[in-house]
Amino acid sequence: MNTPIVPLTRALVDHRVYTIALRKMPEFLDVFQRLAMPVLLETLGQPLGIYTSLVGPQNQFVHLWGYEDLADYERRCQARDSHPAFGAYLAASGHLITAQETRLIRAVPLAEPPRT
């Protein structure tokens, strides 16, 4: 049987990792919640997940957003970047972020292992 293990709801995922300045995570989370999330929810929709690092590299904030395809990604990112309130988030968070990684990753439909 060739059934996916997990149903694929979004073909493309924007996987972002922000490294936050030492001891600034609480301030960053406050700024993100107040200034970024309203804009992101309006322009990108619901995130697939939002996380902070626990083991491994520290002071990292990760969020995942799903898209139907590259055109959907580009359209919604343009809406985010041109939103009148997004600049306030960028200005308030700039001193808190020391690095950013952005990856676009594709979903892979894996089959269930055979039942024994």
Image: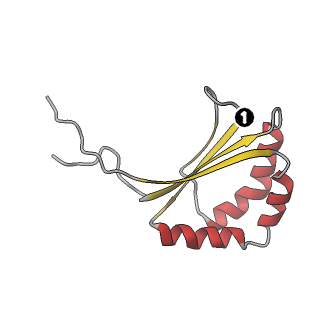
Residue located at (62% from left, 67% from top): 77
Q: On the rendered image, what quadrant is the C terminus found in?
A: top left
Disc 1 residue crowd, few under 14, some 14–19, many 20+, Cα 10 Å? some
At label 1, the amino acid type is Asn
> Looking at the rendering, which quadrant does residue 34 occupy?
bottom right
* Label 1 secondary element: loop
| Total count of labels | 1
| Residue 17 position within the rendered picture, expressed as x and y whole percent measured from the top left | 63, 45
Instruction: List x then y, in percent, for residue 92.
Output: 86, 54
Point 81% across, 65% down: residue: 87
- The residue at 45%/67% (across/down) is 69
Which residue carries the number 1 mark? 59
67 displayed left or right of 115: right
Task: Indicate the position of residue 78 as horizontal and vertical percent values.
Answer: 64, 72
Residue beneath the point at 51% across and 70% down: 72
Left or right for 10, reference 90: left
- Where 67 falls versus 5 (above or below)? below
Residue 42 placement: quadrant:
bottom right
Of all residues, the one furthest to the top in this rendering is 55
- Residue 27: x, y in percent? 83, 42
